[in-house]
Structures are given as structure tokens and as C-alpha cells.
Amino acid sequence: MSIDGFPPFIAAQLHYLLNQCTHSIKVDQVWSGSKYPPGLYDRFTLLIPYCLDFIRWDVIYNVEFPLAAPDVIFGPEDEDFHPLSATSGGRGGDLKPFQKSLQDWNYKDPTLLLALIQELRDHYVSYQRKRVGEVDDDRLKFEISTIVSREGIEMHMSSGVEKPEEVKFAVPLLDKNINKMVLGCPWRHQQKMYLQVIYPVSRKYMTAPSAPRLKLMSTPELKALFSVDDVKLPSWVEGMCMAEYLPHLEETLERQVLEAVSLIDVRRRFIETLAPLFGRPVEADSVFCRKATFLAASGAFIFLVHFLVSTQFPKQQPSMILQSTQHFNNHGMPVKSTLLADYPWSPRWEASQMAERIFEFLADESLNFKSLLDELVTAKSSTPLDVARFQVCHSLGGGTGSGMGTLLISKIREEYPDRMMMTFSVFPSPKVSDTVVEPYNATLSVHQLVENADECMVLDNEALYDICFRTLKLSTPSCLKMASTFVGNSTSIQEMFRRVSEQFTAMFRRKAFLHWYTGEGMDEMEFTEAESNMNDLVAEYQQYQDATVDDEGEYDEEGIDESEEA
């Protein structure tokens, strides 16, 4: 939960409460009750776990008077809860008054809010125990007397106009440290299981009390190891009490928890048997072995296989999801298959046989997945593209910007010949980069840009470097200090083209590093054509630079004379 918007002293206390409390307290909503200063939160609602549910308390600070301790407003069902009362009046009258939290309040101490909430919760536990003890129900009194020695039991008395009175118990089960049973346990809090028991309050005129409602619950993180939803509760026999019921339930739970811990190694061995077929996993759950991701290939099609292993493995077969590394949806997310769980499987197979059957299944399923992706691409490409022009930003010095960039431009030109193509092309400079084949890359790129681009916005790294070095006096300019400079379409741009052309010619005459390109399938004729195009470009700009006003006038006069003679 973000604590932005709170004054620093409230933010510090709230942060300490949420991170250090043994109970998983949550903040439900925040608001401000002060006009000065505006925009700062000083009030919030806490959801505090109690009796397998939550109680809602509003914490009210006054940001204008930070020295004052906060007020706490309890829920409407707890209107008789008065923890600050030291007199005998009211249901909270026999509770002990606060000792430190409020008497020694110091707004600079970030630990005091936690101490206050914990102390209030302890008082609330005593308050609810007192309420339950006052219920005139012999069966409830007997139940309480048989389990009161159990540590950690919480009780809650609920009543209202539209709902009957009932008493709820939260009974902790299995006095064992489950965290220590898991190797490399990541849990910050102690994992627990509870039995929720709800008794309707019996009336004197009722012939026989009804059986309680039972529900097995646990802390959320425990589901990674063991799901209480898979446990079948023993039947409640008429006349039974919790003191008789709980030992049988705990015996069943202990056996199933030990089995769940042992199944971690079974899942780990299964994932290890996948490695010889798929390679090492790119990602895996190393503690509970519930998930693993492998990189696979079918020809040129590369995809990921996500394995989701249930806690009931091997009784329940793993599920799989295929994810393409080359196809993305409209939101930029990789395309995934549906959940795959219908394939040959038997829990009696050895782990190696399970892995082989899965590998064989995926060999065919990957082809189906690839066909589906191809259909999606075809359908998407047939949709009319409503754009006016394309813009490509690339560098001409490196291999990706010059090679892949110009290839992308040419493919777009083939597919959309009636759209404008605009590029932002960064020309290289040996003063900035030490890539030796930059003249080759730049010249070959210009050869393609002349053919396929309608507009080229040229960025000259050489000019940027000179500005930083000579004008700004930066001996070693960094990328952050080199502001972008566009070279306009003037005849001075020929100097940059001429510089690159001269570097290209010097290398090409000696065939220097040419084998790097011819080895990939290029022909020397492509270099010759690119050099010729660059020289023509320089000559064309030189022609316009040499042109004078008189020359333009002569052209006009010649046009007039020819028209008169005609």
C-alpha cells in the first residue's frame, strides 16, 4: 500500500505498523480532515484481522496539531467497547487502562501507532470474551470450559435486528512450526490453520441445540504448500463437543501436511526430468516447485512452455501454457495459448515417462499453436492501416540501425507504397565511436535511404562533438550533455556526406574488412553502387552550391528567347 500523501510523521508510523505487525493489517481507505495544509491525508480506515474476519477501525489524526495522539473510532457493532474506561460502568469497565501508548505519546516515535493498535486489539479480545461469557446458553458455557486452555482462541459475539445471535470461535490447530518444515521457507509470518466454529445461541424453549457450522481456514500463503479446501472435515456427531472433535481433526491435518511437504521433492524430481528434453529452466519455483518455465523451439518458431504443477501432483497432472516469443497482442503483451491439460497422463508412470509423453505432446501442439498465430498475423495484416506516414529513428554507424533499420524501411515501403516515409538518421563520427566499419554501414544505408525515404532528418555526431568540444569547452562530452542538432537541407550538408564517402573509399580500395559482409552473402557490386550513389549525392549538392544568381537569370532569359522564337 502506498503511503504517499501523508505527513512524514504519520507516514513513518503507518509504514512501521504495516510492516512490523504480526497481524496482516490493511488500509481500506484514506481521506483528509484538514483544510490547512490542503492535500495531506491525516485519516484512514484499518482492516484488522480478528476471529478469521476483519474489524474496521478509523484512525483520526489532526495534522494541524501533530503533538496530539490520534483518535480511534470503532465499528457500530462495538458501541459498548470502551477500552479507555477505568470505572466499573459499561461492558469495558473491568478492562485495564492504557499504560504507555497514550500517556507517553510522542509523534516522532514511529513505533507508537503499532503499540496503540496492538493494545487496543488485546482489549478487544478481552471485551469479546466477556460478551460471550455473559450469554445465557449452557452448551456454550460448557464448550468454553473445555477449550479455554487452548492458546490463541478468539471469540466473537454477533447480534443484530435482522440476524440471529451467534457466537463464532477461531480455534488454532496443529501446535507445530510449519515454516521450519519447508526448506528455504520464504514466509515472513508463522503459517497457521484454524477451525471456524459458529454456534447459534440456543433459547430455553428449544428442544435440541443445532449442530455448529464448521469451516477450515488458513493463512493465504499456506496454499503454496497445502490447500485446506482439499481437506474433508470429519462429521460432527450429535452430542459431540469441540474437545472431542479437535483431536481427530488435528490428527488428519498433521498427516496431510507431512504428505504435502514430502510431495515437494516429488515435484522437484519431475521438473528435473524435464531438463534433459527442454534444457535448463529459464525460471522455476525453487521452494515449492509449483512452477517452471522452459524455452523450446519447433524449427524457427521459438516459444516458452509454462508448467503449473498442482499440490496434488502426481494425482493431478500438470497444466501447461505456451507463450510465443515473436508474437504480441494489441497491448504489447506476448500471445499465450489456452490452458493445456488434456494429454496422455497416468500418476503411476515414472517421472521420466511423464516427461517423454509431455515432450511428444508438445511437438504436435506447438505446430497447432504456430498455425493459430499465423492466422492471427494474417488477419491483423489484412486490416487497413489508418496512418499518414511512418517515422523511423536509427543510427547509421552500427549494424542494427543501418542494416535492420533500412531493411525495415524497405519492407514498409513495399507494403505501403502510398505512405510517407520519414527517418531520423544519426550519421557516425570517429571522434565519438570507434567502430571501424562505420563508413561501410553509413554508405550502404544512404544507398537504401535514397531509394525508399521521402524525408531524412540528419543528425551529425561529428557536428555535435565539435560544438561540445570547441564552443562549450567540454573535453569529454557525454550523451546527456550533447544536445541534438538537426542539419538542415542546405548545401553545407555535403561536407558530412563527403567525409563519410572519403572514409568509405579509403577502406574499400584496400578491401578492408570486406569479408565481414561478403561472408554474409553480400556482393562487392552493392558496395560499388552505394559508393556511386553517395558521390552523385555530393555532386548534386555541389551543383546547387556553385549555382549563382546570374546563372539562374541566364536560365530564365534562355527560356524567354526560346518562347519568342517559337
Image: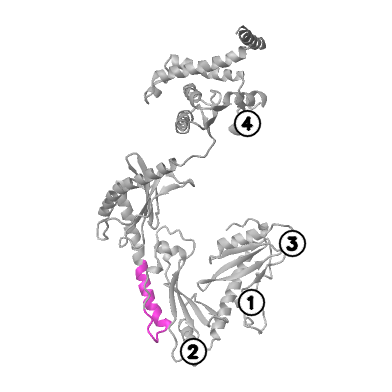
Q: CA distance from mark 4 to mark 1?
A: 66 Å
Q: Which residue is mark 3?
A: 64
Whichever of labels 4 and 3 marks the residue nearer the N terminus, that label is 3
Q: Nearer the viewer, residue 123 or 321?
A: 321
The quarter of the displayed image where residue 478 is located:
top right
Secondary structure under tag 4 reads loop
Residue 295 appearing in the image:
no
Q: Residues within 10 Å of mark 2 (few under 14, many from 20)?
A: few
Q: CA distance from mark 2 to mark 3?
A: 53 Å
Secondary structure under tag 1 reads loop
Q: Which residue is mark 4?
A: 483
Task: Please state the total of marks drawn on the protein image.
Answer: 4
Q: Residue furthest top?
A: 565
Residue type at mark 3: give it.
Glu
Magenta range is 235-257
Whichever of labels 2 and 4 marks the residue nearer the N terminus, that label is 2
Residue type at mark 4: give it.
Ala
Q: Which residue is mark 2?
A: 138
Is residue 391 shown left or right of residue 322? right
Whether 253 is among the magenta residues is yes
Whichever of labels 2 and 3 marks the residue nearer the N terminus, that label is 3
Tell me where residue 281 appears, x and y as whole percent.
37, 48
